[in-house]
Image: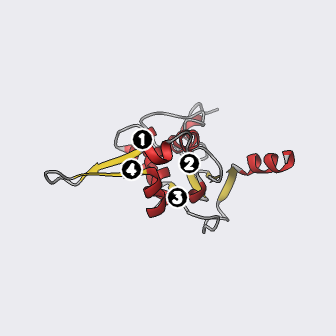
Amino acid sequence: MSQAVGNTALAYARVWHLVDARQRVLGRMATGIATTLMGKHKPIYDPASDCGDYVVVINAKDVLVTGKKAEQKLYRHHTGFPGGLKEINFENLMEKDSTQAIRKAVSGMLPKNRLRDVRLERLLIFDDAEHPYDANIFKQYGQEQQQEAKKQQ
């Protein structure tokens, strides 16, 4: 019997995960997404290989932040020109493009190496519940929490 179980195509098969961002805290959700994109939930995980899964995030416009982060959290980037430091707070970023807040949070939690951009390509974020990947979804997260909250009310 072969001992090379970790190198089989079945072990590296990519699974599609659906995450519902409605009423979920941004940072806690982003850590789970980053773990899934890296493949740390798989027994064949290797930091140098790309063995993560696809993640589809829906309802990105309904994500929450705790405390006063909505007014106080700043996202900064530099244009490359003198005096080109640009700042935008969380509220304005959500109005402009709500998917970018989740993308930036997940990007900050991934390792800063060559695989980072490849992993972020497998992160698909949508503002509402409509997405074209219904046939691919294998696991769903966030739906269970909503159903439990409805039962408690």
Front of the two marks 2 and 1: 1
Left or right of 78 on screen, residue 65: right
Can you say which quadrant of the picture contains the N terminus? top right
Amino acid marked by disc 2: Asp
Residue 88, compared with residue 48, is above or below; it is below
Residue bearing mark 1: 108
Question: Element type at marker 4?
Answer: helix
Give the residue displayed 41% in from the left and 36% down from the top.
48
Q: Earlier in the sequence, mark 3 or mark 4?
A: 4
Left or right of 20 on screen, residue 9: left
Q: Within the image, what quadrant is residue 130 found in?
A: bottom right
Q: Which mark is residue 53?
A: 2
Residue bearing mark 4: 117
**Alpha-carbon span between mark 3 and mark 1:** 16 Å
Give the residue displayed 61% in from the left and 59% down from the top.
59
Q: Earlier in the sequence, mark 2 or mark 4?
A: 2
- Total marks placed: 4
Q: Earlier in the sequence, mark 1 or mark 4?
A: 1
Residue bearing mark 3: 124
**Alpha-carbon span between mark 2 and mark 4:** 14 Å
Are discs 1 and 4 less than 8 Å apart at CB? no
Q: Earlier in the sequence, mark 3 or mark 2?
A: 2
Amino acid marked by disc 1: Gly
Q: Within the image, what quadrant is residue 41 found in?
A: top right
Tell me the crowding category of disc 2: few under 14, some 14 to 19, or many 20 or more residues within 10 angstroms, Cα based: many
Tell me the crowding category of disc 4: few under 14, some 14 to 19, or many 20 or more residues within 10 angstroms, Cα based: few
